[in-house]
Image (cartoon, rainbow, N blue to C red):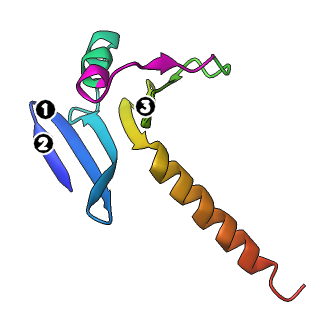
Amino acid sequence: MLFHKSGIAITCYFVDGLCVQLSYKKLDAATRFNEREVEILRMANGSKWQLRPDDSRNFRFYWFNEICECLWDRNQGLLQFETLEEQKRKAAEKRAEEKKLLEGF
């Protein structure tokens, strides 16, 4: 589902009726979220966020808590939340696809 509010596009992805991924991006392609806006949106979507250690990609920041991960891509102007359960589901799906490639060997 896609929503627009206050100049921001909000995209929600659902699996089995539950929102598993939520993304925010400004509608004006020339503007990006600033640090304060990211903090406000992060706090609106959870608590006890911990910054993941720097992995040398200074344009991407990751936070996590007990239920989801948050990515802020400064270059793309994207702020995205994804549940840990969805990440596990995607990883299991990928493993199953890889396993199918080896069938018959």
The magenta segment is: 42-53
Q: Would you name the residue on which mark 1 appears?
A: 7
Q: Amino acid at mark 3?
A: Cys
Left or right position of 16 against 60: left
**76 or 88, which lies in front?**
88
Q: Earlier in the sequence, mark 2 or mark 3?
A: 2
The Cα atoms of the two marked residues, 2 and 3, are separated by 20 Å
The residue furthest front is 66
The answer to whether 64 is drawn above or below residue 86 in the figure is: above
Residue 53 in percent (x, y) is at 62, 17
Identify which amino acid the numbered label 2 is placed on: His
Query: Pointers 1 and 2 in contact (CB under 8 A)?
Result: yes
Q: Quadrant of residue 67?
A: top left
Real-space CA distance between mark 1 and mark 2, rounded to the nearest whole angstrom = 7 Å
Q: Nearer the viewer, mark 2 or mark 3?
A: 3
For the C terminus, the quadrant is bottom right
Q: Which residue is mark 3?
A: 70
Q: Split into 4 quadrants, where in the image is the N terminus? A: bottom left
